[in-house]
Image (spheres, helix red, strand yellow):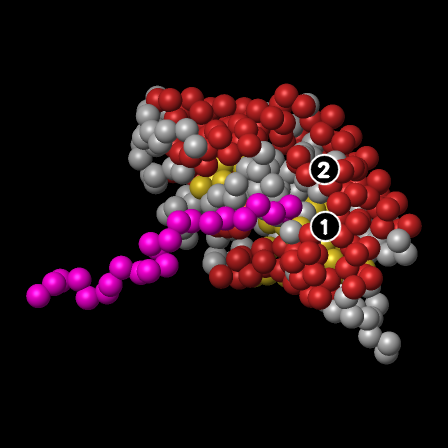
Amino acid sequence: MSAVSVPPPKRLQKPLVVPHRHMFGPGPSNVPPRILEAGANPVIGHMHPEIFEIMNDIKSGIQYLFQTQNNMTLAVSGTGHTAMECAIFNTVEPGDSVLTAVNGIWGERAAEMAERIGARVNSIVTPPGGYFTNAEIEQALLKYRPALFFLAHGESSTGVLHPLDGIGQLCHKIYSYFICVTLSDSVMSVLTGIDILYTGSQKVLNAPPGTAPISFSERACQKIFNRKSKPVSFFLDLSWLANYWGCDGKASRTYHHTGPVTAFYSLRESLAVLVEEGLENSWDRHQKVAEYFHRGLESMGLKLFVKDIKARLPTVTTIVAPRGYNWKDITSYIMKTHNLEISGGLGPSVGLVLRVGLMGRNSSKHSADMVLAALKDALQHCHKSKV
């Protein structure tokens, strides 16, 4: 009698078929052939010296990306959520006060993560599409005296690019630590006083999802490495990650987990692409393409969700959901007819917006024109209510 009681699944006896699509949502974005090819290199051991050299390359690339010289700079094995938990789980202890700025989904998620480890969480909230003044932030910091303040610099669910000037200094006045998530190419982390900064690989960097660049200031490291208790997650314990990434000054690296070596190849190549273009050129390209796209939307009679021009995220544009249409009909029609992904809202912006991401290689006037044509076609063919 066979020991195998579950038969081979017939679906796995068919070849893998993955369609090519234009990925113009909020992420992941299309991966250039060069980066895909890098990920197809042979697998070698996650503790081999060649991998450590690749990890060193990645560290240098992330320091350039974030414009920081923080020694504690690495890529977490996982998506952006993993980096968010790494930041919060290492910094916050049970009973600590945490303040989150909620102007979209990421402030909500940060609050839930902190609550799960027993922190005392408070939030300041503004409607989707808005942002906080420094006076509002300072008032909340003085009221709650948090050990940690979380803010999304690039709020992809609402399309807001939150101003950063002066916020780090406000946090440091009351001995609070400033965590920031970004979707843009970079922020000046040293100049803005950010203590922990992270992003995902699948956005502007155009790498596959699965790695998340993150950087900790020396100030943040002092708090983390003087905790009273161990972080709740072994996998995300920075003392172990610091050693694996060669950030702790020790002569040898110790096994912690099996690093995703092929994802490291892709991330390394995506950072090399950014270095070749240059940060300032990348910033300029994304901004010009966003402005071109916004003019095209407004010429069609569509409205941008973020009213303040200076607070519009250049990588993810939010469009007010056209009145009389079901936003799902629009995104479904565009996917079916144009093989092109755009998205609806997320979290607080569900039902309010359409989201279009023009990031990395997809940040071009040609891509913007493709989306504009698809939107125009959808508005002509999708059902519009007369109510």
Residue visible at 63% across and 21% down?
A: 276
Q: Residues within 10 Å of mark 1 (few under 14, many from 20)?
A: many
Amino acid on which disc 1 is placed: Val
Where residue 207 appears, as percent x and y from the top left, is: 55, 37
Give residue 187's quadrant in the image.
top right
| The N terminus lies in quadrant | bottom left
Amino acid on which disc 2 is placed: Ser
Where residue 44 appears, as percent x and y from the top left, is: 33, 29
| Residues rendered magenta in the picture | 1-23
Q: Residues within 10 Å of mark 2 (few under 14, many from 20)?
A: many
Q: CA distance from mark 1 to mark 2?
A: 11 Å
Q: Is residue 37 visible in this depiction of the protein?
A: yes
Where residue 375 appears, as percent x and y from the top left, is: 78, 55
The main secondary structure of the magenta stretch is: loop
Mark 1 lies on residue: 356
Q: Is residue 76 left or right of residue 98?
A: left
Where residue 338 appears, as percent x and y from the top left, is: 69, 52
Give residue 53's quadrant in the image.
top left
Q: Are marks 1 and 2 in contact (CB under 8 Å)?
A: no
Q: Is residue 357 above or below residue 376?
A: above
| The C terminus lies in quadrant | bottom right
Magenta-colored stretch includes residue 83: no
Nearer to me, 315 or 75 = 315
Q: Tell me the number on the disc at residue 363.
A: 2
